[in-house]
Amino acid sequence: MTTPDFGNQWHELQLGTVDAEIARLAAICDLRILDPGVIERVIAGDETVCGRSSEKAFRNLAALVKMHYALTEDSMRALGPEESGRILDKIRERLRARYDIGGKN
């Protein structure tokens, strides 16, 4: 019998929850968050990247993108870059089934 890896599960839950909300807010703002340059413009506060104006959604989106980076950094320290990458790939795959998040498939 194997012991569940609660560290992996915890990091996947944290990142998955934040990334799902990022995808939802990106849909509200009508932007494809993973297209080249979009995340950088969101972090910079450039609301012109949005296809639809929603100041509150954009403000929350920018904050959550920053949180995503902090959680990813924490995950990489705890699990290593390979395992963190696998978790993020799994999350992106799930989100692509629900949202048009852009980027490469």
Image (cartoon, rainbow, N blue to C red):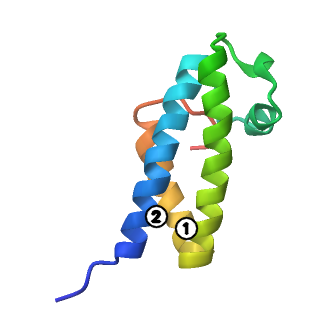
Q: Position of residue 73 (x, y in %)?
A: 65, 65
As shown in the figure, which amino acid type bears the numbered disc 2? His
Q: Position of residue 32 (x, y in %)?
A: 63, 28
Which quadrant, please, contains the C terminus?
Answer: top right
Dot 1 and dot 2 residues touching (CB under 8 Å): yes
Q: Position of residue 93 (x, y in %)?
A: 45, 47
Which quadrant, please, contains the N terminus?
Answer: bottom left
Query: Residue placed at 52% from the left, 33% from the top?
Result: 23
Query: Residue placed at 46% from the left, 64% from the top?
Result: 11
Write down the residue under mark 1.
84
Residue 50 visible: yes
Between 81 and 71, the one lying in front of the other is: 71
- At numbered mark 1, what does the secondary structure look like: helix, strand or loop? helix
Write down the residue under mark 2.
11
The residue carrying pointer 1 sits among few (fewer than 14), some (14 to 19) or many (20 or more) residues within 10 Å by Cα, namely: many
- At numbered mark 2, what does the secondary structure look like: helix, strand or loop? helix
Mark 1 to mark 2 CA distance (whole Å): 8 Å
Q: Position of residue 15 (x, y in %)?
A: 49, 54
Closer to the eye: label 1 or 2: 2
Query: In the drawing, does residue 66 fall left or right of residue 86?
Result: right
Residue 80 visible: no
Query: Residue placed at 68% from the left, 34% from the top?
Result: 62
As shown in the figure, which amino acid type bears the numbered disc 1? Ser
- Say which quarter of the image contains residue 103: top right
29 to 41, vertically: above or below: above
27 to 94, vertically: above or below: above
34 to 99, vertically: above or below: below
Query: In the drawing, does residue 18 fall left or right of residue 29?
Result: left
Query: Residue placed at 41% from the left, 32% from the top?
Result: 98
Q: Looking at the image, is mark 1 or mark 2 earlier in the sequence?
A: 2
Between 67 and 92, the one lying in front of the other is: 67
Residue lying at the far bottom in this picture: please name it. 1
